[in-house]
Amino acid sequence: MSSSFDKFQKRRLISSYFSVVLSIFLVLFLLGMLGFFIINSKKLADDFKEKIAMTVFFKNEANDTILKAFDAELKKSPFAKSYVYVTKEAAAKQHTDIIGEDFLEFLGENPLQNSFDIHLKADYVVKDSISKIESNLRKNAMVSDIVYDKQLVNLVNDNIKKVSMWILIVSVFLTFIAVLLINSSLRLSIHSHRFIIKTMQMVGATKSFIRKPFVTRSLKLGLLGAGLAILALIGVLIYVQTNFPNLGILDDKLLIGLVLLAVLGVGILITWLSTYFATQRFLNLRTDDLY
């Protein structure tokens, strides 16, 4: 009879530990993913901005000397991330490939112009900066026209501001939920030992002596949950890097290391604080209140 009861208690204890570790793991994993999303959100936003092209068309009178001079100017410019020179012949071939017919046969001549497709650095893809760049480029007398999607530029910047605000709100909310979930799991675990705590106190054990094994056990569970969360996060990073290498998610190893350390630190800190205050609560309760 005693043996079966001991086995039941052991299974109950293991189940309690498992639920605590699982809750810590899930919460810290979600916080870690949020951290990675935050540090990579600017990179993703910048990458999207730098895909917006500004096309500078030149008049037919612009000779090779003028085009080479403009090419050299772009190389020295602080705003150009990359650019491609597109001849009017190459542009005509692109149009023919797209529409499936050679429109030059109908027109008899090529109406297109030589152009430069310029991809600006992300910091310059804002309304004021891109307008100044456009104004400066138009000072060249051989520039026929400059085309880019102004509405898309404004839309991207407005949406980035909105998304950044919501990321901040969600981060605060999830952090609060994380603290509550881990705290609740540990409180429930300690609640099952409330009679042991009070018995030890009644026979003269000090509060620090009673609290120590509970804090030590919770820290071990916190370390285990945090360790599993870190391993899972590293697995996700490797998976994303393998399948989406263009994102360069592993480029900033320092920030990645800081996020992983933060996950470990949060796991230790929350478990320690939750266990300390939970045991303190039961230590301060009267015996009648335990029921």
Image: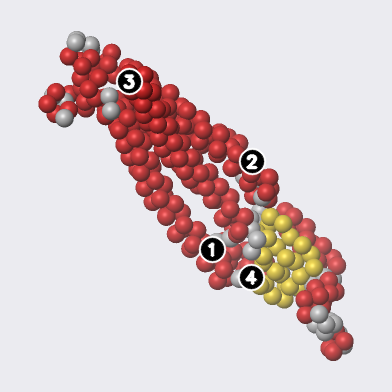
Residue drawn at x 48%, y 63% is: 158
| Helix, strand or loop status at disc 1 | helix
Mark 4 Cα shell of 10 Å, populated few (<14), some (14-19), many (≥20)? some
Q: Name the residue furthest front.
A: 1
In primary-sequence order, the first of circles 3 and 1 is: 3
Give the number of the mark in front: 1 or 2: 2
What amino acid is labelled 2 in the image?
Ile
Q: Above or below — where is 186 with respect to 150?
A: above
C-alpha distance separating marks 2 and 3: 51 Å
What amino acid is labelled 4 in the image?
Tyr
Give the number of the mark in front: 3 or 1: 3
Residue 237 visible within the image: yes
Give the number of the mark in front: 4 or 1: 1
Tell me where residue 130 sits by quadrant.
bottom right
Picture coordinates of residue 51 (x, y %)? 65, 61
Q: In this figure, which residue is indicated by the disc labeled 4?
A: 148
Q: In this figure, which residue is indicated by the disc labeled 3?
A: 1
In primary-sequence order, the first of circles 4 and 1 is: 4
What amino acid is labelled 3 in the image?
Met
Tell me, for residue 238, which label it has, or none: 2
